[in-house]
Amino acid sequence: MMSKPSVLFVCVHNAGRSQMAAGWLRHLAGDAVEVRSAGSEPADQINPMAVEAMREVGIDITANKPKILDYATAEASDVIITMGCGDVCPAFPGKRYEDWKLDDPAGQALATVRHIRDEIHTRVENLLADLHPTA
């Protein structure tokens, strides 16, 4: 793995789980990790409940926009984390690949999205500890 690892978070709409995970990793790793997120079928905007849940912990993801997953982004990433996109999520040989089973925050109440946010936080902390990035 390169001295500055790159992590790609992928979910279907790139509007909730992957955006929260990217927000957590940027917050926790600073510039020690290159953080990307994308979706197989991106939504028009980020889930407002995800934005609010992240705002509550001091992380602003309002400027983020859902992006389409493309081959070049996946190919350039060292670690690909998928979240509930099933068969439409990519698998690239030679990449570290993890599938995080997480509830979809779409249409959920803020209390439920908070639980998802906190579960993502724990997983991102574990991922970061495993990456051992150098600042």
Image (cartoon, grey):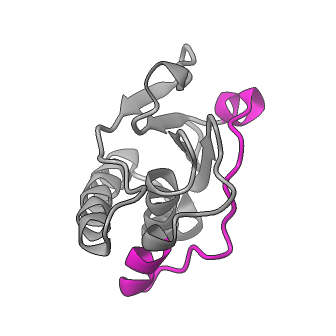
Quadrant location of residue 6?
top right
Q: Position of residue 49 (x, y in %)?
A: 43, 71
| Image height of 21 relative to 98, above or below | below
Magenta segment includes 67: yes
Q: Quadrant of residue 41?
A: top right
Relative to 65, residue 83 above or below: above
Residue lying farthest top? Answer: 93
- Expressed as whole percent of the image width and height from the top left, the position of residue 11 reads 50, 41
Query: What count of labels does the image hold?
Result: 0
Would residue 15 be found to the left or right of residue 97 on screen?
right
In this view, the residue in front, 103 or 5, is: 103
- Relative to 32, does residue 99 appear above or below in the rendering? above
Q: Is residue 55 left or right of residue 68?
A: left
Q: Work out which residue is located at the far front of the displayed protein and give it.
A: 107
> Image point 57% across, 49% down: which residue?
14
Query: Can residue 135 be found in the magenta stretch?
Result: no
Residue 79 in the image: x percent, y percent?
50, 36
Of residues 61 and 42, the one nearer the viewer is 42
Q: Quadrant of the N terminus?
A: top right
Which contiguous range is marked in magenta? 51-76
What's the residue at 61%, 41% (across, down)? 39
Q: Residue at x 55, y 13 (%)?
A: 93
Left/right of residue 47 with respect to residue 121 in the rendered view? right
The residue that appears at 54% across and 17% down in the rendered structure is 94
- Residue 116: percent from left, percent from top: 28, 59
- Name the residue nearer the viewer: 100 or 4: 100
